[in-house]
């Protein structure tokens, strides 16, 4: 098993607009194709204006297969166009991690 930890940083005042677009357009697609969201968070202390979401996959190949199917869905292109018009991203960071041998994820 691997997890994909994604952190998106936004310009002040843009994060909530992105979250609304995401909830309406991307969340349903990600639930359909990616399936296993372990968490979806916004920061309120420390580095602000960030969204962090965590996804579980069986393997890197499973991740790539699921994400490729999602990106081929026409609805994903619609979401991407709307996000581009919002012009709110500062940065995106993805970390792929695996559990240690002594930890069994639930």
Image (tube, grey):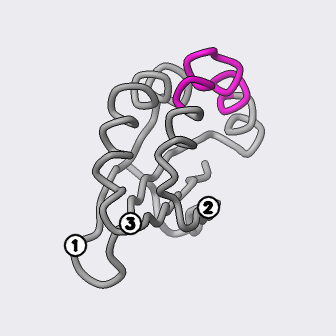
Q: Nearer the viewer, residue 59 or 72?
A: 72
Mark nearest the camera among 3 and 2 is 3
In primary-sequence order, the first of circles 1 and 3 is 1
Q: Secondary structure at mark 3?
A: strand
Q: Earlier in the sequence, mark 3 or mark 2?
A: 3
Q: Residue at x 61, y 61 (%)?
A: 94
Asked if labels 3 and 1 touch by Cβ distance under 8 angstroms, the answer is no
Query: Magenta part of the protein: which range?
Result: 66-79
- Residue tagged by mark 3? 50
Distance in Å between CA atoms under marks 1 and 3: 9 Å
Could you tell me which secondary element the residue under label 1 belongs to? loop
Residue 95: in magenta span = no
Closer mark to the observer between disc 1 and disc 2: 1
Mark 2 sits on what residue? 94
- The answer to whether the residue labelled 1 contacts the one labelled 2, judged by CB atoms less than 8 Å apart, is no
Callout 1 environment at 10 Å: few (<14), some (14 to 19), or many (20+)? Answer: few
What is the quadrant of residue 24 in the picture?
Answer: top left
Q: Which mark is residue 44?
A: 1
Judged left or right of residue 8, residue 62 is right
Check the image and report above or below for 87 versus 46.
above
The residue at 36%/81% (across/down) is 47
51 sits left or right of 33 in the view: left
Residue 5 shown left or right of residue 67 in the figure: left
The picture places residue 41, in percent across and down from the top left corner, at 30, 57
- Distance from disc 1 to disc 2, alpha carbons, whole Å, reads 20 Å
- Of all residues shown, which one is farthest toward the right? 61
Extreme left residue here? 44
Residue 37: x, y in percent?
A: 42, 41
Residue 43 image point, x, y percent:
29, 69
| Residue at point 36%, 56% (across, down) | 14
Q: Residue at x 56, y 53 (%)?
A: 3
Prevailing SS of the magenta stretch: helix
């Amino acid at each position: 098993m691997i997890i994909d930890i994604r952190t998106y940083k936004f310009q002040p005042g843009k994060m909530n607009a992105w979250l609304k677009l995401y909830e309406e357009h991307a969340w349903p697609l990600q639930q359909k194709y990616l399936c296993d969201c372990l968490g979806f968070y916004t920061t309120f202390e420390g580095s602000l204006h960030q969204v962090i979401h965590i996804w579980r996959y069986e393997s890197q190949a499973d991740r790539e297969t699921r994400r490729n199917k999602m990106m081929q869905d026409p609805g994903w292109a619609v979401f991407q166009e709307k996000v581009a018009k919002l012009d709110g991203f500062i940065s995106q960071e993805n970390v792929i991690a695996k559990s240690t041998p002594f930890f069994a994820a639930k």
